[in-house]
Every structure is written in C-alpha cells, then in structure tokens.
C-alpha cells in the first residue's frame, strides 16, 4: 500500500494539482464511533505552545491525543474557525507501518489556548489514522485518512459556525454516512480535492472481481458524482 510520507499544513487557497494514491483490498464492516467527549474545559493546558499563526505544537497535541484516545498525534492542520479562531485539527492514531491494529482512534479540534473544543472517537480496526496531505483544501473541509488493514478511506469534516460536522465517514450510531469514501484516490484540481472511489462488488471474491471508479467533486454543499 502506497503512503504519503510527509504531512504539511496548507492555506485554504488554490494550489497546483497534486495526487494522493491510496490502495488496498477488502472493505471492512463500517466502524462504529462514540459521541464526542464532554469533559472539556476552557482552561488552557499546562504546556500550551503555539506558533505565530495559532497552531498548537506537536508535543502538546500528542499530550491531548493520549489523554483523549490513548494515541499519539499523527498529523494536524490549521483552520480558522468562526467560533474558536485559529484551531488545530489533529488525527490521533497509529502511524504508517503499524503491524497491529488499535481499536480506538480519534480526531481533536484544539484552539490556540490548547482547549479541546471538539473531539470524535472511532472504534473498530485501525492500522493507521493520519491527516491527509494537505489536510484542507479551498472548500475549508478537513480530510483525515484511515486504514483498517486493506483499502484506505477518508473521513471528511466540515467546520460550521458552532462546531464541526461529519460529511464523510463513520457516523455515531449509524454505521456510516450516505457517502462512504473507501478505497480512494484524491487529486487537487483548482484547489479542491476530487475524490475517486474504487467500487468493487467482490463477486466471486474481492481479490479477483473487477472494480470500477467513480469520481466525486465538491459542489459547495456536499460531494456529488462527476
């Protein structure tokens, strides 16, 4: 399975086309997630470190990820949230090359004072959870890649005026959203990700059956088939 070796923070501006190729095999049963943690306060953490733009340090994100999910920070991206200001969104999970899966991973949104403003845990089988490269595009959405052992999928988060919504990926109590982007290739086109999903009917089995691609683009509200 090919991996993207580096994670970069990128402004929400139009960028040149670049591709991320993620491949695997059988699609697992949808992972179940747990509701966001409510044990958050508005007091800053004891080791808060931010840069000039308001991004929280990797060491601080790892401390928060360990406290919330028992995982290290595995990539982050900086957004400007309507309610929270400069906000670092971090993926908390195992890194590329993990030989054994973990059962709980998650995503955090942390303001410039190191307050956890939003979190979401995902429970299932995860060999990797990491921020996409880049982690955002011109839509303002946030892209988190996951690997349950075969294909790679993407979780897409949409910052709102008061919080963060899940557009694509596992839904709490519902298995998955109406858009299930699993087995994907992602390409930046005019500053926006186009997401190509590999569909496979697994007949007679996933290893030998034929697959066909379907590409989705952002229409300003959701992702639609191109």
Image (tube, rainbow, N blue to C red):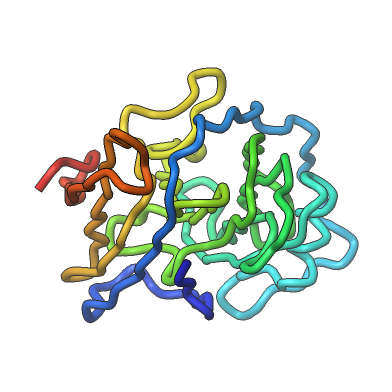
> What is the x, y in percent for residue 106?
65, 45
Depth check: give the residue in front, 141 or 144. 144
Asked if residue 71 shows in the view, the reply is yes
Q: Is residue 115 above or below residue 191?
A: above
> What is the x, y in percent for residue 19?
29, 73
Going 69% across and 63% down the picture, which residue do you hit? 98
Q: Is residue 10 above or below residue 129?
A: below
Going 57% across and 61% down the picture, which residue do you hit? 130
Going 39% across and 39% down the picture, which residue do you hit? 168
In the orientation shown, which residue stands out farthest toward the right? 46
Number of residue marks: 0
Asked if residue 161 shows in the view, the reply is no
Going 44% across and 43% down the picture, which residue do you hit? 26
In the orientation shown, which residue stands out farthest toward the top? 173
Q: Is residue 226 above or below residue 203?
A: below
Depth check: give the residue in front, 158 or 112. 158
> What is the x, y in percent for residue 91?
61, 56
> What is the x, y in percent for residue 27?
44, 40
């Amino acid at each position: 399975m090919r991996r993207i070796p580096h994670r970069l923070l990128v402004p929400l501006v139009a960028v040149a086309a670049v591709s991320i190729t993620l491949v695997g095999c059988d699609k697992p049963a949808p992972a179940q997630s747990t509701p966001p943690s409510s044990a958050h306060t508005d007091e800053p953490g004891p080791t808060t470190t931010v840069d000039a733009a308001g991004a929280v340090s990797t060491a601080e994100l790892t401390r928060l990820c360990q406290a919330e999910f028992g995982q290290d920070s595995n990539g982050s991206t900086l957004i400007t949230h309507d309610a929270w200001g400069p906000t670092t969104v971090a993926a908390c999970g195992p890194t590329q090359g993990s030989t054994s899966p973990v059962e709980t991973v998650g995503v955090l949104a942390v303001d410039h004072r190191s307050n956890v403003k939003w979190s979401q845990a995902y429970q299932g089988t995860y060999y990797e959870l990491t921020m996409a490269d880049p982690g955002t595009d011109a839509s303002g959405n946030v892209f988190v890649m996951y690997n349950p052992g075969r294909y790679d999928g993407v979780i897409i988060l949409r910052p709102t005026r008061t919080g963060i919504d899940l557009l694509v990926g596992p839904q709490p109590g519902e298995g998955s959203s109406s858009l299930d982007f699993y087995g994907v290739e992602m390409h930046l086109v005019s500053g926006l990700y186009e997401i190509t999903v590999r569909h496979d009917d697994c007949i007679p089995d996933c290893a030998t059956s034929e697959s066909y691609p379907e590409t989705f683009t952002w229409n300003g509200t959701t992702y639609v088939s191109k």
